[in-house]
Image (cartoon, grey):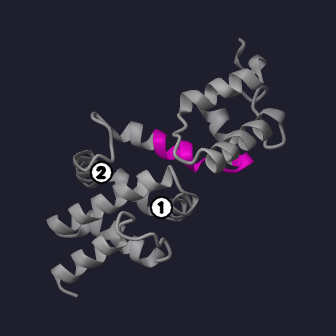
């Protein structure tokens, strides 16, 4: 496949051009091209990745696809040059807010990747730096309620973005004792 065909292939995967998220191998190749492709391939891949990240905050099928591509996304964001290229193109195309940094990108990715009770418990324990005696488990009431709330958000308000601060505030409402000294 020559360069022009590869660019067409990369653009064809973009969620802004198609509603299909079935080609996991194609997406893996797209992430590979985002790191090691030519300049035009990296830009086309960055646009597709930015669109995928935006769609993943709104639709379950893209969220599931992104979770399947977690290793590829992590590898891409750990490489400073690739991360800079992707974030730069994302900003240009409106997929990232002004001043977006890898830290903010990681937080946004983490929030919509929280789906199971185990992920909620791990996130909460890590985010609040809970000691062994205060750590929450998957069967605790706060984790069950937060999981149900996040599922409800995803199902009934798919376009609404949920921030870390919102999750923390909800946890504070559900179990104030977790936040006391």
The residue tagged with tag 1: helix, strand or loop?
helix
Earlier in the chain: of badge 1 and badge 2, it is 1
| Picture quadrant of residue 168 | top right
Label 1: how many Cα within 10 Å (few below 14, some 14–19, many 20+)? few
Instruction: Work out which residue is located at the far top of the displayed protein and give it.
Output: 181
Q: Is residue 116 left or right of residue 154?
A: right
Q: Residue at x 40, y 37 (%)?
A: 104
The foreground one among 107 and 55 is: 55
Provide the major secondary structure of the magenta segment.
helix
| Picture quadrant of residue 67 | bottom right
In the image, residue 70 lies at what x, y percent? 49, 59
In the depicted structure, whether residue 172 falls above or below residue 94: above
Mark 2 lies on residue: 83
- Is residue 125 on the magenta stretch? no
Q: Which residues are magenta?
A: 107-118
The foreground one among 168 and 94 is: 94
In the image, residue 145 lies at what x, y percent? 78, 37
Q: CA distance from mark 1 to mark 2?
A: 14 Å
Q: Is residue 26 left or right of residue 8?
A: right
The foreground one among 35 and 86 is: 86
Mark 1 lies on residue: 71
Q: Residue at x 36, y 74 (%)?
A: 29
Q: Does the rendering let one see residue 130?
A: no
Could you tell me which quadrant the N terminus lies in?
A: bottom left
């Amino acid at each position: 496949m020559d360069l022009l065909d590869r660019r067409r292939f990369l653009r064809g995967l973009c969620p802004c051009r198609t509603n299909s998220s079935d080609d996991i191998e194609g997406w893996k190749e797209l992430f590979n091209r985002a790191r090691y492709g030519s300049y035009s391939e990296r830009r086309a891949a960055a646009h597709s990745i930015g669109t995928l990240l935006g769609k993943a905050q709104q639709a379950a099928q893209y969220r599931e696809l992104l979770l399947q591509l977690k290793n590829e996304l992590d590898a891409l964001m750990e490489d400073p040059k690739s991360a800079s290229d992707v974030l730069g193109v994302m900003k240009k195309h409106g997929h990232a807010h002004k001043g977006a940094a890898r830290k903010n990108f990681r937080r946004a990715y983490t929030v919509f990747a929280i789906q199971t009770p185990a992920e909620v418990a791990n996130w909460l324990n890590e985010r609040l730096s809970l000691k062994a005696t205060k750590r929450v488990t998957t069967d605790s009431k706060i984790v069950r309620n937060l999981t149900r709330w996040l599922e409800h958000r995803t199902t009934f308000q798919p376009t609404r973005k949920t921030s870390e601060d919102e999750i923390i505030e909800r946890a504070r409402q559900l179990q104030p004792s977790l936040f006391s000294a």
